[in-house]
Amino acid sequence: MSYRNFPPQQGLYDPRFEHDACGVGFVCDIKGRSSQEIVRQGLEALRRLSHRGATGADPKTGDGAGVLIQVPHEFLARVCAENKIKLPGKGEYGTGIVFLPTDNDERMFCKNVFSTVIKKQGLALLGWRKVPVDNRDIGRTARKTQPVIEQVFIGSGKALQDKDGLGLERKLYIVRKLIENAVERSGLLQKSFFYITNLSSRTVSYKGLLMPSQVENFFVDLKEKDVASAICLVHSRYSTNTFPTWDLAQPFRFLAHNGEINTLRGNINWMAAREGILKSNLFGKDLKNILPVIVPGGSDSAALDNMFELLCLSGRSMAHAMMMLIPPAWGQDKFMVEKLKNFYRYHACLMEPWDGPAAVVFTDGTSVGAVLDRNGLRPARYIITKGGFVVMASEVGVLDINPADIKSSGRLEPGKIFLGCFS
């Protein structure tokens, strides 16, 4: 439970002294080999991070937990065929799990917005699939607020010309923002809420108002043998600055975060002030459709994900974007080469650091990494095996690994990035 939603109290208590204790991590095959084993290992790591989550008065309703994996094309092609949805080839369509209103009229309104926006953007709505869930073991509070969960499939319609392979990703980003804004501005949702966990041709997010041990049983898909991925990002939430809800569970579209962004209000205000002068050759006239960049009412982690998403889709690598958002303590570093200092000097003119104790894991579906804040105030440890398996987590012990199989291990240092690339 988050105490920041309560009015200020007199006495020694001050909500500013609260800190996150979330559990974050990822497992991956460094050679890019997709398998169900990676997903299974990710779920096991998530279960072992349960102590880093929290519950309220309802002991079976957690603060939120989830996983982010690569799109399991073989699995989706099979289940879509069963639902009479014809999918194109791998990477030629976008998909995402959507939290829809429980009210029939509100749900149909949201789906109609999807249809309208997708068509106007030159894409094709391939169909909807009801995501199978088993809510028998989740808490009363989580079940009471549980949305209708469905998965949408969007075809590219026509070839999207781009040099970096992100043409479809950018178009899906624009589609999502247009849909979110249209639903928000309509003011028609009264009985429940609406949220798009992700729209991507590369990744899919399974998350909710769950405890880490409940994720695998709730999302029946995750038990299927052909749900394979080379990456599994995990998060066990301990909420401190927002009340636990289905949509604020992590991972988000690109990252999962443990920490506190102490400069959050300034970061949000500066971004809002800059929206009027944003320019991008990649987005062109569509740039206006993604505003506001940072969605109001989100957590500090959600806001950071909003910014990271924009920077990555506007042409920067993930490492570049993260070095802008969470830079090391470079100003007085006598050992840092001048060329790298100039990089940070230049970007300091464009972006204020999102500062505070933070450990962040991130992926775009082709690369995966982690970063630690400049003071190193959050734990982040990693193991690389001789077989090319990597695990990074808030602590050691999230997986049982034979010491003889370990190639290297260590702790992520303050201000440093741990990054693996494969495609």
Image (spheres, rainbow, N blue to C red):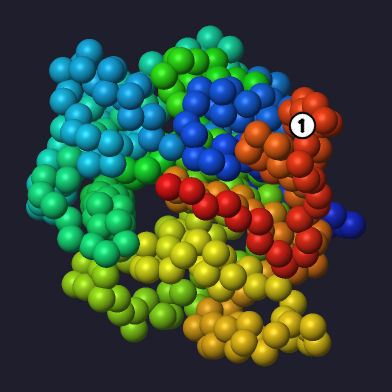
Q: Is residue 77 above or below residue 420?
A: above
Residue at the right extreme of this rendering: 12
Foreground residue, 15 or 123?
123
Locate the N terminus by quadrant. top right
Q: Is residue 172 at least partly visible in the picture?
A: yes
Left or right for 226, reference 41 = left
* Residue at figure coordinates x 57%, y 84% from the top left: 343
* Residue at figure coordinates x 27%, y 64% from the top left: 163
Q: Is residue 307 at least partly visible in the picture?
A: no
Foreground residue, 57 or 76?
76
Residue 266 position in % (x across, y down)? 58, 75
Left or right for 201, reference 84 = right
Left or right for 286, reference 124 = right
Q: Is residue 227 above or below residue 235?
A: above
**What residue is pinned by disc 1?**
405
- Secondary structure beneath label 1: helix
| Image quadrant in which you'd find residue 16 | bottom right
Q: Amino acid at mark 1?
A: Asp
Residue 277 position in % (x across, y down)? 34, 83
Residue 385 position in % (x across, y down)? 71, 37
* Residue at figure coordinates x 32%, y 66% from the top left: 291
Residue at the top extreme of this rendering: 136
Q: Is residue 389 above or below residue 131?
A: below
